[in-house]
Every structure is written in C-alpha cells, then in structure tokens.
Image (spheres, rainbow, N blue to C red):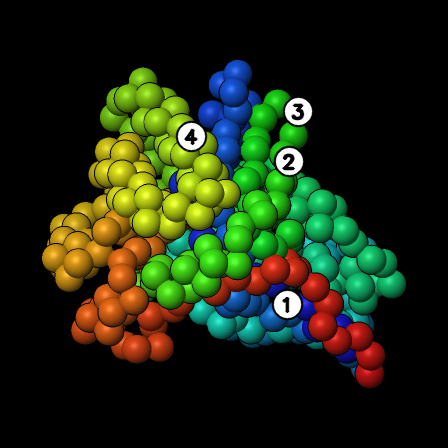
Amino acid sequence: MIISRTPVRVSFCGGGTDIDSFSMSESEGGRVVSLALDRHIHVTVNRRFDDMVRLSYSKMELVDDFENLEHELAREAMRMTGVTSGVEITTIADIPSRGTGLGSSSAVTVGLLNALHAYAGHEASAEQLAQEACEIEIDILGQPIGRQDQYAAAYGGVNSIRFGSEGVSVDRINASDEAIGRFSNEFTLVFTGMSRSASEVLSEVPEDESDKITRLRTIRGQADQAYEMVVNGDISGLGSLIGEAWNTKRGISASVSGGDLDAMHDRIMAMGASGAKLLGAGGGGFFLVHGSIGLREKLASLCEPHRLIPLDVDWIGSEIIHKGD
C-alpha cells in the first residue's frame, strides 16, 4: 500500500494573476504569495486481487476499464503514471475537496500523481508533480484555473511563486520564527458554510475586461507588497493588505462575492478584524481573517468551532508517508 499526504494552500495576495491568459500576456507575469496549510488530502493506492479499478472518494466507482471512471483527475493521473488496472484508490480529505478556496482539487491531483508514481516504483520531484498536475487540469481537462495551487501543494512552505512565459518559479520565503508564530496566532480561516467550484467562477466573463486587467495588475502589485511584509515580519501590515486585496478582487466579477458573503465579511470586520478576504476564486469557502489573538474567540460565533482553522504551515509539501504491505 502507498499513502501520500498533500497540503492545501492559503493565498495571501496575487490570486488570479497565475492564470495563463494574464501571466503569459503581461510582460511582468503573475505573482502569488502563499503558504501550504497544515490540512491535507490523503491518497491511498493498494493492489487488488483482480484487474478492476475501485475508486473511493465522495462516491465509489468500480470499473473494468479506468477509461470509464467519472473522476477525471484520477483517470488522467492513472493514464499519466501508467497505473491503469488492478488497484484500489481512496482519497480522504481533512476538509471538503471542492469549493473551499484552498486549492483542494489541485491538492487531490498532486496527491494522486505522487501516490501512483510511488506505486509504479518511481520517485517524483515537487517540480514534476506540479507540472504534471497543471498539464492534467489545464491542458488536458481545459479547466479555466491558474497554476498556483499545484505548486503550493507540491512544494509546501511559505513561498513567492512567479508565473510567466518562461514557466513557473518557486522561491521559499525565509520568514522569521516570530512571523511564523504570528501567522498561527493572528490569522484564522473561517468557513462560510457555502461552496462553489472555482472553475464555475473563473469561467464567467467579466462585464469590463479592461477593468479586470487593471485590477489584476493591482493584485500583482499587492503580491509584491505581501512578499516584503512577510520578509520583514510586518504581519499586521499583511493583515490589512488582505482586506485591500479583497476589495480589489471582488470588483472583477459579481460572482466573487454576494449578499450573504458581504454580510459575513461586515460582521467579521465589526468584531475587530484588521483585514479579511475570501480565499480562492470566490462564491464561498473560507474567509482568511487577521486580528488580535482574542479575535478567534469572537469568530467562534460565526460557525462550528472545528470550522475555525489557525494558519499553521506545512513545510514539506506532497510526500509519501507509507510504502509497504
């Protein structure tokens, strides 16, 4: 049996600039400052007695031919790794695997690839896993998403990730121990109780394309600011900046936010938050909230306690945690 463990991600600033239509056309490219969160997708791969393929996730599939799998990510990961028969595959998520704004779907793809490569006797690097996940999701399946999620999941840590015509580069940010501790104490993920596919939001055409490009350029500049703040340990400044990033982003499309989400954002700010933003493409999922240590107790009134998540970092990225019988 092979078991992989892959983190989801939290993006501070820069989301949207990682989409090819922007990063490939802008001379400066795109940039995201993000971290891998200590919440994971586990994938197991085990040999079957027969040649069938059994896949278990939110539903169960049992097929004679992997081509008949409804789960597109699993089907294409099997094709790419050459593991196409006689296996049982399960995916288990610490959080829902779709619609949370944490890049869960891409973490599933990276985790599937890592586990299947290991099952086939190959060791895949973080770069290989990220590239192959992007190929599956963007090039093969044609999903209108960016490339930040796959790289954050594969590499782990706190990173500045750049996107452009020459490819993707990942630079680990050497944040101080004090800054990392403040991430955990001052930032909280708050579940909205709503979810929506990132592909659905990102596929919608904005009313004003020129305004969208202007906003994305502003968002890219905010990622530059976020990098300097993390390096310099200015966590309070970063907390305020994510609020500015949210205001910029929700002007791109009406689907990014909405009445209930705006009302929840207002309640969060009224509790004393210095900044809050909805993670991912929008439409639901988690708010990233910054404030004093005591703020988390107040936020507990918004959702179940287990749906408040501190911002703890996964430093490893996708890894094989079990290999054997």
Q: CA distance from mark 3 to mark 1?
A: 29 Å
Residue at the spot of label 3: 166
Res 89 → quadrant: bottom right
Q: Is residue 243 visible?
A: yes
Residue at the spot of label 2: 169
Mark earlier in primary sequence (3, 4): 3
Three-letter amino acid code at the position of disc 4? Arg
| Secondary-structure class at tag 1 | strand
User: Is label 3 or label 4 in front?
Assistant: 4
Residue at 22%, 56% in the rendered image? 273
User: Is label 1 or label 2 in front?
Assistant: 2
Res 245 → quadrant: top left
| Crowding at mark 3 (Cα within 10 Å: few <14, some 14-19, many 20+) | few
Mark earlier in primary sequence (3, 1): 1
| Secondary-structure class at tag 2 | strand
Three-letter amino acid code at the position of disc 3? Glu
Q: Residue 135, how many percent across, how many down?
A: 65, 41
Q: CA distance from mark 2 to mark 3?
A: 9 Å
Three-letter amino acid code at the position of disc 1? Arg
> 42 or 200: nearer the eye?
42
| Crowding at mark 1 (Cα within 10 Å: few <14, some 14-19, many 20+) | many
| Callout 3 touching callout 4 (CB < 8 Å) | no
Label ID, residue 104: none
| Secondary-structure class at tag 4 | helix
> 261 or 274: nearer the eye?
274
Residue at 28%, 45% in the rendered image? 240
> 218 or 261: nearer the eye?
218
Residue at the spot of label 1: 5
Three-letter amino acid code at the position of disc 2? Ser
Q: Residue furthest right?
A: 121
